[in-house]
Amino acid sequence: MRKSLITYWGVGICMLAACKTTTKQAPQEELETASPSELSISYKVPGDLASPDATIEELATFAWNEFFALNWRAEWAAQASSPASSRSRGLPDTSWDFATSGAAPDLAVWETYIHRTELRPADSNRYKVNLNTGKPDYTFIDPINTNGIELSDYWVNLDEDNEIGSCYLYAYSENQVLYMAKSNLTEYNYVRDKFPDDALLFKAVNNGQDLEYLKKVSQGQSCNSDTASNVVCLPCGEYGGQEGAIEIKTAWRKLTAADDPTRFFTRKAVYYTYMDKDGEATAQTDEFGLIGLHIIHKTKNYPAFVFASWEQVDVRQAQMQTIGQDVPQKIINGDTINDPNVDPHRPEPVIDREIPSEIQTVNAAAKALITSQNAASVWQYYQLIGVQGKPINYEDRATDPNYFMANYVIESDSTLTFFHGSFGIPFDESIQNVVYNGATYNMGGCQGCHGQAQLKGSDFSFLLDFGAGKPVDRPDPYLAFDVALDSVGYEPTQLIQMIKAYSKRN
């Protein structure tokens, strides 16, 4: 369904959540972290960088080491002989050998992370199911037609069809890009233990909006709140220590004859249409290729998160096209309609920046490492396009080539590609949207965008705020290009009728 950017916007300042440190941590006994300063293909997730003043190359190396660990084979796959209910999620198979693994693992660690509909279940009861083990448990507020599909058999559940209410994205004018967001066990267990239902989470989110107090919170105090009635403050990773909170967002599309499937990480995935007689979301399955990946990771040295993003190397040649969702409206003859003078369609995403040279150097080293150990690995066809650590101000943007970090298939329109300021007032150079170590910044790109989540007191996480349909009422539908173009500006019930009419015509 259509999700407006305005639902994320409240005021023009964002802040780090005020936190009291505590010795209680989410369960970590089975997690191993690493602290390498060089590229290393390993199952150990790096907990942090050694310094809060890392270079771009060091941040890029950290990002690739995250990527390698999260794309390690999942322990779930190694426990095939055990009952599904007892098989572990979010952990690596430490006996797996990358060098002899072929193109890709049969199941990656991040795939077994906690889906956004599991982190925020429809009934808000996070203690009803313990998701540290077992199959996924997807829930939506509205009933859906499962179409005979057992949803829990699929780790890739593509329930988002747009870029946070900004635009739809298509390849070759036919294949819509769909999205999925997940969190690691550290974040899940923190939220489950401290906010077992949404009433407690709502209270904490509201408590996290006192700007003047938040400015006084030091960098070292920004990890872990000590009570459910305090604030949302996610756990930090530590250098050589605990993993910290991690969220991922992935972008997928069906491949065509123009694509070489051997260059894509592919999965049989669940997606949804609105084609049944009652307008319910109807589950479907098909093969999809991974075309984009975000990893955001909260660490002690980088409590405003390290933001890293990858693209499949061929996506910019796939004739990508955007359809903007927030088209201005006019009242004509008493009816509110989309402004007929504004064309929501762009023949290609607006991003035109090159990958920073420092990151290109690390990418080349990562590819060489991958192919030297496993020439068949599909990960040689993915590239890091940017990484952000500490926020900076708009006027200092020339000092950091990652200031406007945006993924070609996750932040494709002008609002997200050149993000700074706020959703309510895009591109405003005066708005301070991130608080870091007592100072405020007008940060751009992914970090500035996620800073908007702090407007709702949810510590850079859009998964934990109360905007844009959370808990999720219904999954977004896969739309034909013509339907998406015609549907801009309409509400879900109107969209369902449009889809039905389109189906009858075709």
Image (spheres, rainbow, N blue to C red):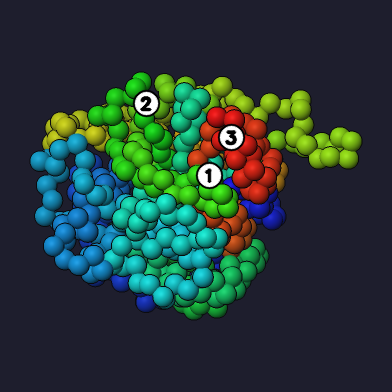
Q: Amino acid at mark 3?
A: Lys
Q: CA distance from mark 2 to mark 1?
A: 23 Å
Name the residue: 42% across, 60% down. Answer: 138
Task: Pick whichever of labels 3 and 1 is earlier in the sequence.
Answer: 1
Position of 273 with respect to 212 (left or right) is left
Q: Which mark's residue is nearer the viewer, 2 or 1?
A: 1
Task: Pick whichever of labels 2 and 1 is earlier in the sequence.
Answer: 2
Relative vertical location of residue 181 with respect to residue 221 in this rendering, above or below? above
Residue that badge 3 annotates: 504
Q: Secondary structure at mark 2?
A: loop
Say which quarter of the image contains residue 82: bottom left
Say which quarter of the image contains residue 502: top right
Residue that badge 1 annotates: 275
Relative vertical location of residue 109 with respect to residue 89 in this rendering, above or below? above
Relative vertical location of residue 376 with respect to residue 237 in this rendering, above or below? above
- Expressed as whole percent of the image width and height from the top left, the position of residue 259 reads 34, 24
Q: Amino acid at mark 2?
A: Thr
**Residue 141 visible within the image:** yes
Q: Secondary structure at mark 1?
A: loop
Say which quarter of the image contains residue 337: top right
Q: Which mark's residue is nearer the viewer, 3 or 1?
A: 3
In which quadrant is the C terminus drawn? top right
Residue that badge 2 annotates: 256
